[in-house]
Image (tube, rainbow, N blue to C red):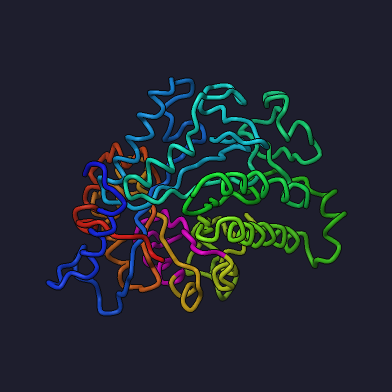
């Protein structure tokens, strides 16, 4: 499919949803399936040049061409949203007054690439009938531990007291109110400048546990944690504040823009908490990232959630077929839309279980999810695999489920 105007996209979607002939855009749904739109998204990661640009230091023309090729592929597969990573490591893919230009563009942090990737992405995505969700990583500063490698003007160098070294990386300390205020200000600059369709956070709040290492926030806890029963409760409250404040600010600045989060797919295992999922995952977002994602959904603090359900159907420790109904029940009765994060990157990877060598595994995920009315769509990780589609898993999804374009849910 070539370029699709917003009007043409809307008309095609409306035709799909209201066709008098009863023709469906997908295989016939179960009797409980009711939708007025469906999320069909893809993550476009820039950290470490994972998806785009293919390497740092490319010329403007080539960078633009690669970006547009990703958007063309998404539109051609009849997706309707791109989650574009615009703040991968406390930097920016737009001219920010608060943070340096990303090194993933030019190879040198702080160097002007000569164009505006976020502004271009918004315009080009909208021209293809795609939503552009600006994806921000709140607290990661660098994938190394040497502050002198950061540009001299970097806020982390100007405020070394904000920084925690952990697991071979540098992070902003979520327990400092001044850090939270700065992170929100840096993110909201993009919301003020561009008509992004959503602000999107991934799963990195407090960092994932690293064996034998401690995230040193003692001083912050001593100063601010006195009213909490435990450090864990205080950490969760820090992340709760980030979520609530960000959403409120986004709504104030650009009311039509959504706020969504894509957390680790397991909130808590049932062995830890009777409200948890029937899983035995080694990581639980509530306990390890200090992200109470279940509460955010139940309290309708976020507009949408995309739990990363990066496991196959039937996997003993974390079965996709058990996690979908668990998340559907969590979302039931809330105002938070549930989308499901899909591990396209695992399809055809020989290091993965046998299920991922079957091109039909992902398509089966979408078929299963249709049985749960709270599941309003899927987001695929990630754009590079959308292009390569090693074993045709995405082609199978498109053929089985994405025969016609649809709007995202509203």
Q: Nearer the viewer, residue 347 or 223?
A: 223
Residue 347 shows up from this direction: yes
Camera-side residue of 357 and 131: 131
Identify the residue at image location x=76%, y=52%: 175
Position of 368 relative to 96 (above/below): below
Residue 150 sits inside the magenta stretch: no
Where residue 318 sits, quadrant-wise, is bottom left
Which is nearer the eye, 232 or 240? 240
Percent across and percent down for residue 346 are 36, 45
Say if 86 sits above or below 130 in the image.
Answer: above
Image quarter in which the N terminus is found: top left
Q: Is residue 407 left or right of residue 214?
A: left
Query: Can you give x and y, in whole percent of width and height, for residue 209 in the image?
Result: 63, 48
Residue positioned 50% across, 69% down in the render: 336
Residue at 36% x, 74% y is: 373
Instruction: Report the magenta residues as a range.
Output: 302-327
Q: Residue at x 48, y 20 (%)?
A: 57
Asked if the stretch drawn in magenta spans residue 303, the answer is: yes
Instruction: Identify the residue at the far front of this view.
Output: 7
Quadrant containing the C terminus is bottom left
Question: Which quadrant of the structure image shows residue 125?
Answer: top left
Residue 252 vs 176, above or below: the answer is: below
> How would you classify the magenta stretch by its main secondary structure?
loop
Find residue 88 and report its horizontal and vertical position in percent: 56, 39
Left or right: where 345 falls relative to 395: right
Left or right: residue 300 versus residue 229 is: left
């Amino acid at each position: 499919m070539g370029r699709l105007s917003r009007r043409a996209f809307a008309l095609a979607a409306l035709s799909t949803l209201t066709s008098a002939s009863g023709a469906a855009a997908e295989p016939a749904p179960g009797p409980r399936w009711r939708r007025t739109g469906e999320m069909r998204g893809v993550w476009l990661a820039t950290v470490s040049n994972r998806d785009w640009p293919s390497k740092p230091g490319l010329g403007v023309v080539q960078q633009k061409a690669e970006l547009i090729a990703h958007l063309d592929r998404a539109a051609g597969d009849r997706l309707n949203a791109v989650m574009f990573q615009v703040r991968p490591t406390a930097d920016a893919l737009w001219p920010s007054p608060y943070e340096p230009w990303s090194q993933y563009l030019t190879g040198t942090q702080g160097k002007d690439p000569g164009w505006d990737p976020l502004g271009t992405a918004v315009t080009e995505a909208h021209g293809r009938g795609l939503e552009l969700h600006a994806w921000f990583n709140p607290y990661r500063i660098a994938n190394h531990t040497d502050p002198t490698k950061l540009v001299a003007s970097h806020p982390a160098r100007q405020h070394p007291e904000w920084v925690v070294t952990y697991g071979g990386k540098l992070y902003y300390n979520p327990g400092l109110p001044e850090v939270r205020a700065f992170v929100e200000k840096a993110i909201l600059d993009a919301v003020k400048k561009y008509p992004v369709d959503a602000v999107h956070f991934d799963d990195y709040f407090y960092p994932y546990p690293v064996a034998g290492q401690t995230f040193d926030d003692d001083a912050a806890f001593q100063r601010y944690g006195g009213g909490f029963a435990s450090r864990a409760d205080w950490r969760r409250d820090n992340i709760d504040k980030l979520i609530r404040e960000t959403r409120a600010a986004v709504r104030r600045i650009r009311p039509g823009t959504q706020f969504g989060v894509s957390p680790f797919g397991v909130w808590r295992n049932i062995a830890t908490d009777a409200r948890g999922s029937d899983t035995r995952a080694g990581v639980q977002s509530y306990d390890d990232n200090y992200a109470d994602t279940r509460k955010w959904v139940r309290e309708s603090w976020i507009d949408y959630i995309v739990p990363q359900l990066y496991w196959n159907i039937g996997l003993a420790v974390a079965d996709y077929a058990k996690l979908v109904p668990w998340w559907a029940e969590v979302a039931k009765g809330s105002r938070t839309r549930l989308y499901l994060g899909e591990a396209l990157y695992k399809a055809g990877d020989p290091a993965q279980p046998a299920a991922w060598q079957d091109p039909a595994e992902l398509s089966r995920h979408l078929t299963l999810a249709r049985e749960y009315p709270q599941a309003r769509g899927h987001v695929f990780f990630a754009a590079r695999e959308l292009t390569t589609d090693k074993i045709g898993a995405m082609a199978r999804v498109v053929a089985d489920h994405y025969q016609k374009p649809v709007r995202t849910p509203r």
